[in-house]
Image (cartoon, rainbow, N blue to C red):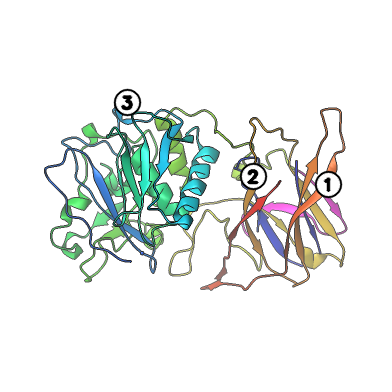
Amino acid sequence: MLVLAIPAKTVSKEFLSYLHFLEVKTNVRKEKDITEANEDRDDILEVSRLSFYNLFLNNAHTYPPKIQRSAVADLDSRWQSPVPYVLDKSLEMNAKGIILQAFDQFRIKSCIDFKPWDSERFFLIMKKLDGCFSYVGKVMANGQELSIGASCDSISIAEHEILHALGFYHEQSRYDRDDYVEIVFENIQSGKENNFRKVNKNDSITNGVPYDYLSVMHYGKNAFSNGIGPTIVTKDPAFQDVIGQRLEMSPSDVLELNRLYNCTSSVAFMMGCSFSGGSACEMSKCEDGDVVWTMVTQADGGPSRDHTHLPNGNGSQVPGVGYFMHANTAAGMEGDSAWLETKRLTPTRSCPVQCLQFYFCQLGNQTDQLNIWVREFQDERDQTGTLRLVDQITGAFQILHLGDKIDLWRIHHVSLN
């Protein structure tokens, strides 16, 4: 059972749980040349180029005669879970850690697991090669390479490449992309036009998932630009500076992955709460004083949206309504507190690491605290448990002004054991 407490001046919390034990979201490159497409290849190699300045991935592909977007349709091109892997000695220590953390995100959000290679014919071999690239789907025996090159070692880029290996192509390759984006071919580098090829509806599958501007598989607006202007323009201007995000897999990425692999549960996920539709996911709340938790879509002087609705470059917000939990300590006295507590959770597998992840926005007095507690039970007969403080976030952080909006969601991880 996870308990979050805030003793008193304004702290906004949004909870979204998914992790080994529990995850709660609280309201709170060496740039390289793109490898040219090799028309003699039958497999598909994706090479990525990343500019951290505007967060987009450019990818070069060699396509087979038929391509299935958003994911491979051929069952033989899909992996059996757990997917065997090898971490090659060429990888730097940080890259190894990033890959393992990316694996955990798949365990948390899907039924896809990963295991060290043990003589299997098909397996992924993670290397540090020239750039970031991956074959699409299970296509090579005796070690299928996936590269996490120099300055490509971030969790979201690892997720992007692993999704390719699991069978995913790019979002803007969809047959219906013209309804959502315009490809500006005169702004594309000469010889790179093939990377913007759209697939035929008869040769593609989308698993019933709508087009997703927020997909971690989407190109950024300046992908393969010749410097004249953007190569992709979104039909909805609010998403122009959002496409190409490399924060994490979007909810639609996760949905499509689970549909592709027929997942009905996750490997490690015990509880999840996005507060969709205003549901508190069986979490209980209590107060000591005048500070209370309330479910809102925006907070005066605080977040104007939940963390899933990202701000664009003009300071406005992408459309949509998301809920989060908000505790306004300004109305309370020093020492007042408000508690938000999950239901009782029992781990379904043996795991040496139990974790919590959440997004939060904490604005207010520097003495304000967000405390994360765990209530531990000895057995089923124990009805009260013992509280243990596992982390504390103190004070407000600097406000980020985006036009007339204030949005500063941050991600936080806590080890629970």
What's the distance in space between the residues labelled 2 and 1, CA to CA? 28 Å
Residue that badge 2 annotates: 278
Return the x and y of residue 385 as percentages of the image width and height: 85, 39
In the rendered structure, find residue 75 and report the number of the disc placed on it. Answer: 3
- Check disc 2 and give the amino acid type: Gly
Q: Nearer the viewer, mark 2 or mark 1?
A: 1
Assign a secondary structure to mark 3. Answer: helix
Residue that badge 1 annotates: 387
Assign a secondary structure to mark 1. Answer: strand
Q: Nearer the viewer, mark 2 or mark 3?
A: 3
Q: Are marks 2 and 3 in contact (CB under 8 Å)?
A: no
Q: Earlier in the sequence, mark 3 or mark 1?
A: 3
Q: Earlier in the sequence, mark 2 or mark 3?
A: 3
Return the x and y of residue 156 as percentages of the image width and height: 44, 53
Would residue 178 be seen by someone viewing this image from the given angle? Answer: no
Q: Earlier in the sequence, mark 2 or mark 1?
A: 2
Q: In this picture, which residue range is highlighted in magenta?
A: 284-298
In this image, 77 relative to 375: left or right? left
Q: Considering only vertical position in the picture, is 307 above or below 177? A: below
> Measuring 16% from the left and 50% from the top, which residue is drawn there?
37
Q: Is residue 18 magenta?
A: no
In this image, 104 relative to 36: left or right? right
